[in-house]
Amino acid sequence: MKFLSTSRLASAASLPLLAAAYVEQPYGVRNAHHPRQVTFAPSVASSAPVAGTPAGTSVATAPVSGVVPHPVSGVAPTSVSGSAVSGVISGVTSPVATTPTTTFTFSLAATNPTAAPLSDIVSTASSSATIPLPTTFAPGSTPSAVSGAPALPNAALLSPANYPALDKIPPTDSDLVKQWIQDVQDSGITIPDYTPTDPGGCPNNTAAAADGNRCWWTCGGCTRQTDVTECPTAMTWGLTYDDGPAFYTPNLLSYLDQTNLKSTFFVVGSRVISFPSILQNEYMSGHQIAVHTWSHPPLTTLTNEQIIAELGWSKKVIKDVLGVTPNMMRPPYGDIDDRVRAICAAMGLTPVMWTRISPTATFDTDDFNIHGGLSTVQQVLQNWEYIIANATTMHNGFIVLEHDLFQQSVEVATGYILPDAMAHQPPFTIQPVISCLNKPLTDAYIETNDNKTNPPAASGVAIAGATSSAGAGGHGNSGSSLRLSTELLAGSLTAVTGLAAGLVMLL
């Protein structure tokens, strides 16, 4: 059993630090630039590890570079005895030598008996063994979980030469992209005439960050009614993993299969072309597949045409591998504003974020940054404990940001986070996002969606703030004019209050 302190509730995993520069680089070198986390309140720790602590948990001082202290109220819980597994780790919260030491305290109700020791889940870890896919599916197979789906294509026929270069923003002058641009123009959705943001996040874009009409999630957490940010039912977790498929995704799939869990995978087009068999296994096993762009750029920094190319190529390669096209997407880094939302709507995509409980607190484990040495597994487990402490007090369910791109993020998920979540009392219902929204898996794909009960994003959806009829390519783009044929719906700015405070913290 886990005992939680109510004083922790203001201390959830925190705001994306997009004050750090965006970096558009291949995945192999992007690991140090996935900035989201500010840290949390210091915790009060016992003087020694609690009995039953998992292997590798100890009291030590280790650098947690790249993490900026965030002054929030509340004190984290002390470790507890009993069946819970607890750990206490000390770490420096900044690369500056004079920064005081912070203690991370977390208590886990259960762990995986075969989990990698915490001491092994580090940026310098040697590569561990990957698990082969349990099944490969023959072309022509159909998924039992997606009624009416077309036959599975032959992934062996996929030719990388027919797609853009991996991990680079696709060119916008191909015939396919020109057709997608025309489709967006013909959708009837007006694209707001906002200038693309500059690299460097909020401090480098003060006017855009202060513009509440733009509804830029990155700076203040603004969302619209068209964004999925949580599950409607309390104690329901919309399980998601980003940035795959990758080498260690089969390890995650094996664990999910063993525990009868299903997830939503937000996949990157460049990874799909590299690992089509893994994507087919995810889909055929009943997991939800959704779009996470072609090359993982911050979308608000792109022109309209580039955004269309990023989303279009990701949709295309997924359909080429699976035979179906997702109708949900997640913007890399959560970087979305009303211009990006409008393009998504015009392309039939609903944005799915992760839960944010204030302008400075999001449900982000920061698991991605273990690989690059910008976070530690102990900090990630501390973040996770803060997340579930807040989740259990919410009237709605929640969505957490996690990743399957790297060995470390898969190991912390399968060894610690998922076992702890499944042992939680009262229990969580753990589902893909489409299921947590009380919709069938068939509604996750354009080809099988029931348009009567689940209208496509582009039908009648309008983005609040889209008052300009400027061209699709304003500010140096092609200049295609998009006309509004639907009424504007009032959006819900969930984080207008406190926006200024959030900007001050980032600056």
Image (tube, rainbow, N blue to C red):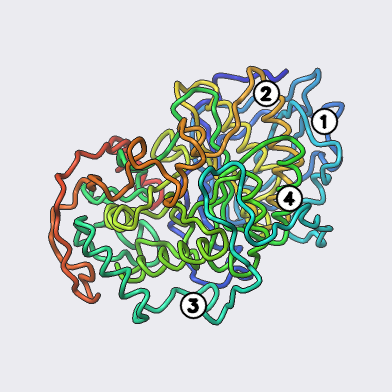
Q: Nearer the viewer, mark 3 or mark 2?
A: 3
Disc 4, SS: strand
**Can the viewer see residue 98?**
no
As displayed, is residue 490 above or below residue 482?
above
Q: Badge 4: few (under 14), some or many (20 or more) residues near its Cα, within 10 Å?
A: few
Q: Position of residue 255 (x, y in %)?
A: 75, 43
Disc 2, SS: loop
Cα separation, mark 4 vs mark 1, equals 16 Å
The residue tagged 1 is 48
Quadrant for residue 5, please give it: top right
Q: Considering only order in the chain, which callout, 2 or 3, is on the residue closer to the N terminus? A: 3
The residue tagged 3 is 164
Q: Considering only order in the chain, which callout, 4 or 2, is on the residue closer to the N terminus? A: 4
Q: Position of residue 134 (x, y in %)?
A: 78, 52
Cα separation, mark 2 vs mark 4, equals 29 Å
The residue tagged 2 is 424
Q: Considering only order in the chain, which callout, 1 or 4, is on the residue closer to the N terminus? A: 1
Q: Considering only order in the chain, which callout, 3 or 1, is on the residue closer to the N terminus? A: 1
